[in-house]
Amino acid sequence: MRDSVQSAIERKALSEERLTREEVAFLLADADLHWLGGLAHEVRTKLHGDNTYVVANRHINYTNVCRNRCLFCSFSADAGDDNAYFLQPDEIVESLKTDGVAGLREFHIVGAIPPREMADYGYFRGILTALREAFPEVQLKAFTAVELEWMAELSGMSVRDTLIDLKKAGLDAMPGGGAEVFAEDVRSRICPDKISGGEWLSVHRTAHELGIPTNATMLYGHIETPEQKAAHLLQLYDLQAETGGFQAFIPLAYHPVGNRLGGEFTTGVEDLRHLAASRIALHNFPHVKAYWVEFGLKLAQVMLLWGADDMDGTVGRELIYHAAGASAPKGVTISELAGIIRGAGLKPVVRDALYRDMREYEPAGEDAQEV
Ligand code: V47
């Protein structure tokens, strides 16, 4: 029985056919781990050979002041809290100039949902225009679907018109945060004030229609079931089949420190299982990331042989996972990432935010930031 389920999944994954919800739930909950890793690596190798992508990037978290206060989030704060902060666009530019941006290809810009009196639409747009003007060579991957919906509300424009306007201001691509698990039953318990799963998907559909590539995520390891995760992955699969606008999927392991939800860290085995199952289920996504900030560099390296083809980037100063108990460094250099990739027997390829302009990593002159 198990053999026939496995061979049906193998055939579908390698011939680009949609898996069923039962099959994806089987991958997430029951499948033999070695078989799972082997098949995920086959899917990854079919798409990319040994190529393993990295970007010299810098994460920018413009504020932690948030109206939503999701129960799993350890980063957000209320306006009056001691740790609350709010950066103006010129302060962001100044701090980047101080740190240096030589060699950077991408800014990854996400924050929170500050109250209306704190930030209007012009504030968010101003972050893009200030960065584009100061650093025209660095691509802007900015704002989750959650931030986008809020900006549309602030601007009085539709999501489509807001995206068109942000694109004019310099938006190149969108990150995949805020997806969590789409099931309403989960959202009402862990992020009751956040946009719905349907709204998240709709913002990404609109971005794709406008030629703005986006990423997708799934937050696992809290209160969700394998069936809910399987449904989440297949909703992503279906949108990708419709638009082709997703670049990368990033599985996000829940971190339990410093928030109201509490609970446990995921284990390494669970992390490998979720990564491999996602790679197999989402065989129509070009890239799956091993975001080393969540897992540490050693497990992220193993993940490159379990379905991941991308390590995200140098990151610079990570705040969201470190607030929630992450023990990885806050940033690394491109040469460190390249060494980790070569140590897995794979080929490091440097990329930009749009997976264009790619070439094999060469040590001379590539080190964007020593952190
Ligand atoms: O949206 C928040 C998650 C996300 C916790 O698109 C938590 O390239 C675990 O989306 N434990 C932000 N996860 C990170 C993210 C991301 C990261 C790297 C690359 C890209 C990309 C996207 O982190 C949030 C939320 O889903 N998160 N709190 C926590 N305690």
Image (cartoon, rainbow, N blue to C red):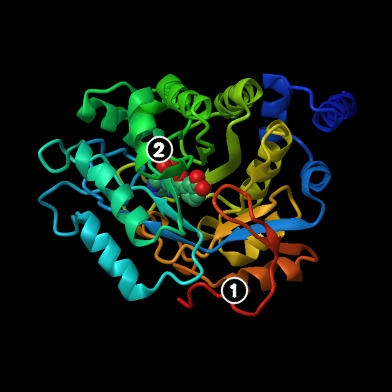
Q: Quadrant of the C terminus?
A: bottom left
Give the total of numbered labels. Answer: 2
Task: Identify the residue at horizontal 46%, vertical 58% (top origin).
Answer: 138
Residue marked by disc 2: 167
User: Is 16 in front, or is 263?
Assistant: 16
- Residue 216 drawn above or below residue 199: below
> Going from the N terminus, do you reach mark 2 or mark 1 first?
2
Helix, strand, or loop for circle 2? helix
Residue marked by disc 1: 366
Helix, strand, or loop for circle 1? loop
Within 10 angstroms of label 1, few (less than 14), some, or many (20 or more) residues? some
* In-image side of 82 versus 61 (left or right): left
Task: Identify the residue at horizontal 80%, vertical 31% (top origin).
Answer: 13
* In-image side of 184 versus 286 (left or right): left
Location of residue 263 by image quarter: top left
User: Is 17 in front, or is 72?
Assistant: 17
Report if residue 263 is visible in the image.
Answer: no
* Residue 352 x/y as whole percent: 57, 55
Within 10 angstroms of label 2, few (less than 14), some, or many (20 or more) residues? some
Q: Is mark 2 within 8 Å of ligand 1?
A: no
Disc 2 versus disc 1: distance between alpha carbons? 28 Å
Task: Identify the residue at horizontal 10%, vertical 38% (top origin).
Answer: 117
User: Is 221 in front, or is 138?
Assistant: 138
* Residue 344 x/y as whole percent: 76, 65
* Residue 333 x/y as whole percent: 54, 72
